[in-house]
Amino acid sequence: MPRVAHFEICADDVARAVSFYQHVFGWEIRKWDGPHDYWVVITGDDTEVPGINGGIVDRRDSFSGSINLIDVPALDNALLRVVEANGTIIHSRSTFPGVGYIAYCRDSEGNPFGLIERDDMAA
């Protein structure tokens, strides 16, 4: 069954957001070395407390608020199901090298969410 696997926080000022989340929660945050501007957020050690990790993105390049990404086995099939259930695709499939494939949608109520198909070999 697909589960929430990742979150993204949108920020007007990424450096300010990084400072905030590091100060308030002690999260480890570092710039991703991939082809997109992205800051990886490590919220803790999975062996100590269950949870998920995430990222921070510039709001101008994304949506407002925070976005949950749901892990799916086949992104294209999940996108078809979104449309069949009266949702909309707001950003089609993108490749994140070494991570997988991501798309963004809105549910039937207009709430944004992301889908991720993990693939370490994505290029």
Image (cartoon, rainbow, N blue to C red):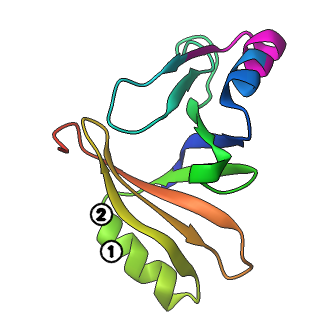
- Residue 116: x percent and y percent? 41, 53
Q: Which amino acid, mark 1?
A: Asn
Asked if 6 appears above or below 87 in the picture, the reply is above
Q: Are marks 2 and 1 in contact (CB under 8 Å)?
A: yes
Give the residue type that dot 2 points to. Answer: Ala
Q: Secondary structure at mark 2?
A: loop
| C-alpha span from label 2 to label 1 | 6 Å
Q: Please name the predominant secondary structure of the magenta segment in the image.
A: helix
* Residue depicted at 72% across the width and 33% down the height: 13
Looking at the image, residue 116 sits to the left or right of residue 27; the answer is left
Residue located at (44% from left, 81% from top)? 81
Residue wearing tag 1:
77
Left or right, residue 35 beside residue 20 = left
* Quadrant assignment, res 88: bottom right
In this rendering, the count of numbered labels is: 2
The verdict on residue 23 being magenta is yes
What range of the chain is rendered magenta?
A: 20-29
Determine which residue is flagged by label 2: 74
